[in-house]
Image (cartoon, rainbow, N blue to C red):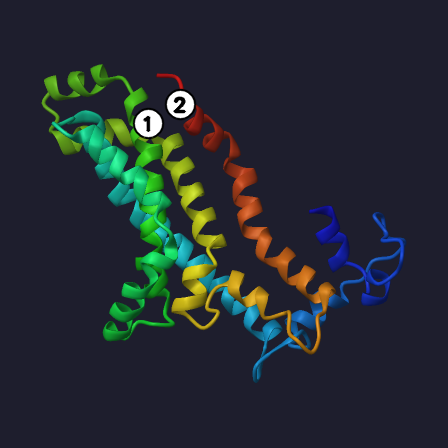
Amino acid sequence: MWFLVVSSLITPSQMGSRSFPLIPDSITFNNFIELLSGAGASVGSDTAGTRLIGSIANSLLVSTVLVALNLVLAGLAAYGLSRFPFRGSRGFELAVIATRVVPAIAIIGPFFVAFRLMNILDTPWALIISYNVFTLPLAIMVLKNYFDQLPREIEEAAMIDGAGRMQTLTIIILPIAKPGLVAAGVLIFLEAWSEFFYSLVLTNQLTAPPLLVGFQSVQQFNWSSLAAATVLTLIPPVLLTLIFQRHVVGALAAGHDK
């Protein structure tokens, strides 16, 4: 990480020196300025620099919508699995976990054909729908383990006082399950932000990860520009992780206290 940050703050000539400066004598922000002004590495007829901010915005949009959607769907599914076990519920949970190991290349073909017929290729909706394949099972697993740790006596007391099941869920459970919801949301955001394969196949470098590949070409390769672009794309997930890391660690550890 330090190598990446330093690379973005030095000139290409310093990058090519025999001894790489771990602590540079002088720094420059020209790599960021040139990148954002459109003087970065070229990608076809466009430039990676001029598309970078747009791709970061698209990544933010897709990740945020996916977090909201997954917390609703996975929250209801996880609560149901935790509070209403049925015959075969354990097998269902294992099936949900098993979907995490299905290779993306095995299902990208049907997605591509379906989205082409729906005319949503190269749009954020193609990514929001397809990303559920790997984010939804993760959210269900995390929230199911967290709901299992919450005392059922609180819900029973609320229902004795006349609260319905949905009232109990929204008024009693959701506030005390906030750490688990935050942890699941952060993990979903990070997975969606860093996803590469679906975005590469279903869109024209709509999000940041596939766009970064465009900084490398057969004719030229500017490592300083790539380092600056990578630093910019890392800022949102790093800040999010630093802010909510306590909730993430606590929620993941809760599933091992059973």
Q: Residue at x 17, y 20 (%)?
A: 158
Q: CA distance from mark 2 to mark 1?
A: 7 Å
Of the 4 image quadrants, the one containing the C terminus is top left
For label 2, the residue is 254
Kind of residue at disc 2: Ala
On the picture, is 16 further left or further right than 117? right
Res 136 quadrant in image:
top left
Instruction: For the residues labelled 2 and 1, say whether their Cβ atoms are less than 8 Å apart.
Output: yes
Amino acid type at image mark 1: Asn
For the question of whether residue 169 can be seen, the reply is no
Residue shown at the point (76%, 68%) measured from the top left: 30
Q: Position of residue 121 (x, y in %)?
A: 34, 72
Point out residue 124 in the picture as x, y percentages from the top left corner. 37, 65
> SS of the residue at dot 2?
helix
Give me the residue at 33% from left, 65% from top: 126
Vertical placement of residue 1 versus 217, above or below: above
Q: Residues within 10 Å of mark 1 (few under 14, many from 20)?
A: many
